[in-house]
């Protein structure tokens, strides 16, 4: 849910809700929070995968 909210904020900043976000701003805290959320989600997915076997 957090990633979805951050993504929407980036889309609004870009001015379009229908295109991919092409942001590489090093000054944007939302950009880095979004990247951290993606990293955390990938790590959680890996941990869940380990429990399946």
Image: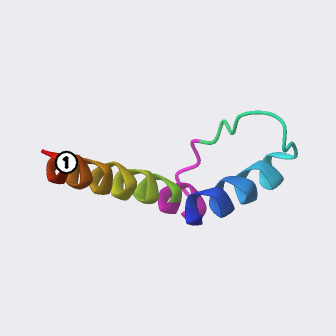
Which residue lies at the image location 15% right of the left edge and 49% below the top edge? Answer: 50
Tell me which corner region of the image, top left, top right, bottom left or bottom right, holds residue 8: bottom right
Please count the marks in the image. 1
**The one of 52 and 30 positioned closer to us in this rendering:** 52
Q: Give x and y (percent) for residue 6.
A: 64, 60
Q: Is residue 3 above or below residue 23?
A: below
> Which quadrant would the C terminus be assigned to in this image?
top left
> Which quadrant would the N terminus be assigned to in this image?
bottom right
**The one of 7 and 41 positioned closer to us in this rendering:** 41
Q: Is residue 26 visible?
A: yes
Q: Is residue 21 left or right of residue 49?
A: right
Judging by the rendered image, the residue that carries numbered circle 1 is 52
Q: Which residues are magenta?
A: 24-33
Which residue lies at the image location 19% right of the left edge and 48% below the top edge? Answer: 52
Tell me which corner region of the image, top left, top right, bottom left or bottom right, holds residue 12: bottom right
Q: Is residue 28 visible?
A: no
The way the protein has been coloured in the rendering is rainbow
């Amino acid at each position: 849910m957090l990633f979805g909210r951050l993504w929407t904020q980036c889309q609004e900043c870009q001015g379009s809700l229908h295109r991919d976000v092409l942001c590489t701003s090093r000054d944007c805290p939302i950009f880095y929070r979004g990247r951290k959320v993606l990293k955390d989600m990938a790590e959680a997915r890996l941990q869940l995968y380990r429990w399946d076997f």
